[in-house]
Structures are given as C-alpha cells and as structure tokens.
Image (spheres, coloured by chain):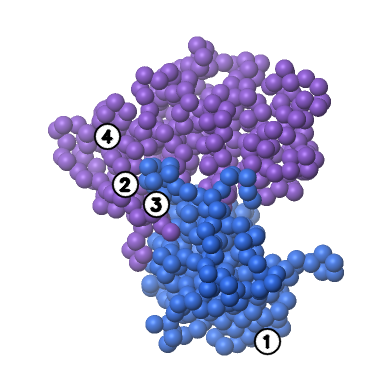
C-alpha cells in the first residue's frame, strides 16, 4: 500500500554534528526515512538518542552537517531561497514538549497564537488576525475570550492546546510534535491525543510524532522508526513493528512498557539492550529490508543468525 | 497478598488539611483515613491537584506555610504527627523515620557538591554509629552499589551534572536510603524519566524494599506504572480516597466510576483509529463545599443520589472498599466500560 503514497518529506543520510574543532559530537549519524502525506510517522528512542535533533533539523533549527532533507521534492536543508524558507515556515510547524516552558509568559494568548501570522502576512488587518486567532482557539477546544489572558492562567493541558493553536493558525501541512504529552497527566494526555487525531482527520495534517514511550506510539502512529544513538535501528508499520520486533533495542523498549495487569507485571522479565552483542567492528551493519516495509540495521551474520537472546537486567545497567 | 491483620506502621484518621489562599480557604484533604501496613508498598493514584502530594507532605511536616491540618490524626509509632509544630520535632521524623524521593532528579540534588559528599552528609546525620571518614566513605560506596551505580570510587567524586537523569534518580534514592528510614515516600519518581529507565528504577525500588525492609508509599498520576510495584492501590479524587484495594482488586475488579475512567484513559489500552476515553470536565473547586459524590458532575452515568448525598465506603471484600452509591444494594447494576473488563487476559506487548 505504501508504494503509491505521496512522499511529503524525504530524509536522506542525514547527519547532524554539534560542536567544532576537537570537541565534535555527532548526534545524528546517517538517518534516512520517508514520511508520506497524511500519515503519522513516529520517532521513538530514549533521551539523548537524537530523536529531537532529527525533528529540529527538519525544522531548520539545527544546521545539518551532511545529507539531504527533501520537502515535496525540494531540498530544505542548508542554504535555500527566501521564498522556500517562507513556504516551509508556514507549512511545517512544531509542537513542543513542555507547555510550561514553551509559551512566552509575558505575552497574551492572542499574541502567542498569532505571532507566526504577523511574521508572515504583515498586511493582515487586526480584525482578520483576531478572527483567525479565535478560530484556532475554538478548534483546539478553548474559549475565544481566552485570547486576552496570560499563559499562567491556564493548566498544563490548556497550555498545550495553546501550543497546538499556535501551530494550527499557520495552516501547516506537517506538524512535528516533540513529546507533546509527556509532561501531562494521564487523563489530559488522552484529551490531547484525541485532539491531534481529530485535527488530522479534518485537515489531513501529516505528523512526525516524537516520543520515548512505545505504548503511546503504538496507539497513535502509522509507522514507527526506532532511534538509538543517532541511528535508526528499526523501521516498520506499527503493528508489524510490535508483533515482529527484531532489533534487541526495540525489544527492550517493548518490554519496558508498563501494563495495567499486576500479576503479569510482577513476573515480567525486563530486557535491557546491550550494544556489545554486536560485532560491528569486523562486520559493519547495513540498513536492509527484512520483510516488505520492515527495515532493520544489522550485519550479515545477524540477518542470518538473529541477534541472540537479550539478557535480563541485574539493575546494574545504564 | 496483603494480610489485614498486618500491623499498621502509619495510620491516618479523619484527616482534614486546609490552605488559606488570598483570603479564601481551600479544603484540600477531606476527611481522609488510611492505614499503611508495615512492609507493604501502597500506591496513591490521582490527577494533578487531587491532593496526593499534600497528603504525603503532611506526614513529614512539609506543608507550605499557608497550609494547616484542621483536624484529624496521623499516628506513627504511638505519636500523633498532626500535633507536631516545631522544626525540632519534625527533624526526628524527616529522613530517619520517613524519607522522600521527589519527582525531578534534576532539581533535587545540590549542583555544587559531589554526589558522594551529599550521600555522606545523610550518613553522618542519620547514622551516628558510623564513625570516622573511611567508615563513612565505605558506607557511601555500599549505597552506591546498592542503587546500581558501578565504579562507586570514581562516581563518588563526580558532580550531579555528570550524571544522566536516571542515574541522578539513583543518587537521590541512595541519599534517602542513607537516612535509614522505615517509610520511603516516592513522589512521582519516574515521571521525568524515559520508559526504559522508568522500568529499571521501579525494579530497583522493589529490590531495595526487600533488602532494607522498607514500607513504600508510591505517588503517581499514572495507574499504568503501579501494577508492577504496588501491593495495594488507593485512588484519590478531590482530596479523598474513592477506592482502596489490593492491586488485583483495583485492576481486575474496579468499582468506582473514577477508577474506571482512569483505567480507560490509559493509552496502552487504546485501539488505533478509535478515540481514547477522556474524563470530561475538571475536578471540583475545593474552595466550595462539595455536596454529594465529588466525581458526579464528570460522571456521565451518575445517579441522582450522587448529587445529593456523599456515599460512604462500601466494603466489597476484606481488602477492597469504594465510595460509590453503585455498590448500594438498591443501585442499578452498572458494568464497567468494556475496554477494562479483561485486564487479566490482556495481551502483553512484545
């Protein structure tokens, strides 16, 4: 089914390096994936894996050091024309993790939500702008009169909605949601996820959904890429990835999902990923398609013999 | 699992806690009673603002200045902690008897001291029988090893910024252990951490509980994470426990509509393409007197009586009780929502 779908975003061998001179750190080490229009593409990994950096590189917040990012066939990393820059500012938007930190405390909601608009359409009249703000607010389930309030008057869930309204007002085609629910309560989480899902239905927005929690991913994403230390180690459609998880790191992530079942939870074996099981010095891994649409980073021996059993923890890890 | 004849290490009796805020009185803990048994781990689950942190802070005299216990008792070791007033009295309880692990390991360590120094401080304060520099240092090494930090000799001299989030939380746990407490309160210890690290910390807490003979009070908003660690679960709503039972009781046979709602909204149980269950509305304002069942305004299937009269506890079994009129013999029989009826046979991922 994936063959005919339109590729909205094509990331090819992306590298992002921080620092310069002797102290260099390569946060993203050769990542390639495609995002289809209208889907939810999940990027999952632990803190420090580079998942956020990938999102930010697409947003042009971090400069790339090698590789290409193509949006609708046009390269958008590195130097680009001012017109294309304007286009992607409008068409790719971001929702941030912590709604307590990502809103300007000294600005009213009205300003926060419409800031992007006034940067892009300087000729817009005040009434027109206000109308758009109110429409965006009601779309995310907030009252229009909230426009004249300050962020501190809102709860965490409401603030995240303001963050979503700020992205929506630009009428984006693609939204990068960087852990949009990790800072929220469980009951609020469900509300925000439902909101994001319904916006996708009505507007056909493409999401790149970044999270550390595979249980949320499983519910929300169409395809999932598992990132470990700056590389994608496994990529597949959600159900395929959950049922046929192959890479030991993916399996470790799956085993860590807490389930609401006390008897099973108590006997659960926690698997921990130990990168030393690979013999990548002699036999470097390649990005290969194992089954249709299911990609994995492995070397020849691992493809033939499998990764072996992952060990159980002795809590002396990390 | 939990034997009702067990000895209670901490007993809360009809506790009321109020805050004065801008001339108004906020009634945050409403007539709460709870027995914490020796050696168990009990999870207190509720939304933000339900009062779960306020309740446990009151066990250590850590209420904010505008908060006070208006009535009730907190019985610990034959003493009523609710009557404690001075810092000097509380110093005997804090750390040595009841210790606490806070939510965010990024802010609960001193960035200017090495982590070894911070653990040693707790050892010197709370374990006077450990004398001499070397003895203290060895003790610190053993705590570091116990919380799963390798190469303690090297780690001793490092500062918090050299540790990752999960490792810092381990250090915080080591400090709590060094106080030699009987009760360990864990206030959302894994909320700020990754899922993989969360699973490791939970396992660590479980191991340490056995090794140090601890009683654990575990606070969280996420029912999903406590199935692993909790012997008993107490569900809090608007400053009161609406359901208390063993983990099996609460997960396999939940009775209160609020517990149903909390379980239903877990993304682990969500079916792709379908809406996740959400709890409508917001928790009640604690400035006002709450009439009837506090959850009724948000409960689409609330009964008429829920709005008129607060339900008492109904006992379902020796270990399980809930505050809802649904358990009254005259109430209509309502089944819990479909998604959570079969948690026992849930397909485990992976």
Q: Is residue B201 above or below residue A151?
A: above
Q: CA distance from mark 3 to mark 2?
A: 15 Å
The residue singled out by tag 4 in the image is B324
Disc 1 on helix, strand or loop? loop
Up/down of A185 relative to A92, above or below: above
> Looking at the image, can residue B36 be seen?
yes
Q: CA distance from mark 4 to mark 1?
A: 64 Å
Q: Which chain is purple?
A: B
In front: mark 3 or mark 2? 2
What distance separates the C-alpha of mark 1 from that of mark 2? 58 Å
- Identify the residue at the far top of this view: B78
Where the N terminus of chain B falls, by quadrant?
Answer: top left
Name the secondary structure under disc 2: helix
Distance in Å between CA atoms under marks 3 and 1: 45 Å
Q: Quadrant of residue B213?
A: top right
Query: Subunit of mark 4?
Result: B
Residue plotted at (57% across, 28% down): B212
Q: Position of residue B42 (x, y in %)?
A: 45, 32
Q: Which residue is mark 2?
A: B344
To the question of a shared chain for discs 2 and 4, the answer is yes
Host chain of mark 2? B
Of tags 3 and 4, the one toward the viewer is 3
* Separation (CA) of disc 2 from disc 4: 24 Å
For numbered disc 4, what is the local secondary structure?
loop
Q: Residues within 10 Å of mark 3 (few under 14, many from 20)?
A: many
Which residue was labeled with disc 3? B266
């Amino acid at each position: 089914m994936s063959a005919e779908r339109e590729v909205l975003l094509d990331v090819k061998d992306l590298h992002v390096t921080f620092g310069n001179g002797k102290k260099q750190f390569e946060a993203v080490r050769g990542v390639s994936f495609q995002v289809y229009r209208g889907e939810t593409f999940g990027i999952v990994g632990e803190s420090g894996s580079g998942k956020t950096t990938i999102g930010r590189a697409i947003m042009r917040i971090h400069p790339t050091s090698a590789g290409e990012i193509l949006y609708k066939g046009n390269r958008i990393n590195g130097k680009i024309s001012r017109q294309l820059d304007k286009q992607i500012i409008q068409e790719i938007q971001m929702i941030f993790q912590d709604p307590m930190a990502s809103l300007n405390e000294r600005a009213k909601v009205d300003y926060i939500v419409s800031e992007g608009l006034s940067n892009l359409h300087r000729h817009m009249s005040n009434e027109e702008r206000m109308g758009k703000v109110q429409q965006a607010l009601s779309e995310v389930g907030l009252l229009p009169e909230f426009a004249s309030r300050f962020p501190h008057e809102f709860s965490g869930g409401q603030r995240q909605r303001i963050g979503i309204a700020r992205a929506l007002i630009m009428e984006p085609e693609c939204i990068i949601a960087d852990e949009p629910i990790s800072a929220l309560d469980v009951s609020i989480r469900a509300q925000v996820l439902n909101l994001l899902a319904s916006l996708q239905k009505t507007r056909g927005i493409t999401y790149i959904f970044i999270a550390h929690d595979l249980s949320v991913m499983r519910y929300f994403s169409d395809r999932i890429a598992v990132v470990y230390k700056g590389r994608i180690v496994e990529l597949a459609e959600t159900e395929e990835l959950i049922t046929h998880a192959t890479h030991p790191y993916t399996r470790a992530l799956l085993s860590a999902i807490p389930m609401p079942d006390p008897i099973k939870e108590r006997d659960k074996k926690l698997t921990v990923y130990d990168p030393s099981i690979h013999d990548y010095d002699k036999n470097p891994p390649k990005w290969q398609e194992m089954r249709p649409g299911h990609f994995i980073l492995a070397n020849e021996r691992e493809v033939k013999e499998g990764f072996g059993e992952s060990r159980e923890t002795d809590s002396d890890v990390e | 699992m939990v034997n009702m004849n067990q000895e209670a290490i901490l007993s809360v009796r009809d506790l009321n806690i109020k805050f004065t805020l801008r001339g108004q009185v906020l009634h945050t803990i409403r007539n709460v009673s709870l027995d914490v048994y020796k050696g168990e781990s009990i999870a207190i689950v509720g939304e933000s603002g339900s009062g779960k942190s306020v309740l446990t802070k009151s066990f250590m005299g850590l209420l904010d200045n505008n908060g006070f216990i208006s009535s009730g008792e907190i019985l610990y070791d034959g003493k009523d902690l609710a009557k404690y007033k001075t810092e000097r009295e509380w110093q005997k309880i804090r750390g040595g008897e009841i210790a606490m692990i806070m939510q965010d390991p990024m802010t609960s360590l001193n960035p200017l001291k090495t982590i070894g120094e911070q653990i040693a401080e707790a050892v010197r304060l709370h374990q006077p029988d450990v004398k001499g520099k070397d003895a203290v240092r060895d003790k610190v090494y053993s705590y570091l090893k116990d919380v799963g930090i390798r190469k303690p000799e090297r780690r001793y001299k490092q500062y918090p910024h050299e540790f990752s989030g999960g490792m810092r939380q381990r250090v915080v746990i080591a400090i709590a252990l060094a106080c030699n407490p009987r009760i360990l309160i864990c206030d959302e210890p894994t909320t700020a951490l990754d899922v993989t690290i969360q699973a490791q910390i939970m396992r660590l807490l479980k191991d340490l509980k056995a090794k140090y003979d601890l009683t654990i009070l575990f606070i969280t908003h996420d029912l999903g994470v406590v199935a692993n660690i909790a012997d008993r679960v107490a569900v809090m709503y608007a400053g009161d426990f609406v359901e208390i039972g063993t983990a099996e009781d609460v997960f396999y046979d939940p009775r209160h509509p609020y517990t149903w709602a909390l379980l239903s909204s877990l993304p682990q149980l969500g079916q792709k393409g379908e809406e996740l269950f959400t709890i409508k509305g917001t928790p009640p304002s604690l400035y006002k007197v709450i009439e009837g069942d506090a959850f009724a305004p948000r409960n689409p299937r609330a009964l008429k009586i829920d709005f008129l009269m607060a339900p008492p506890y109904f006992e379902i079994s020796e270990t399980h009780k809930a505050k809802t009129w649904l358990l009254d013999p005259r109430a209509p029989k309502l089944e819990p929502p479909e998604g959570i009826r079969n948690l026992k046979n849930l397909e485990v991922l992976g």
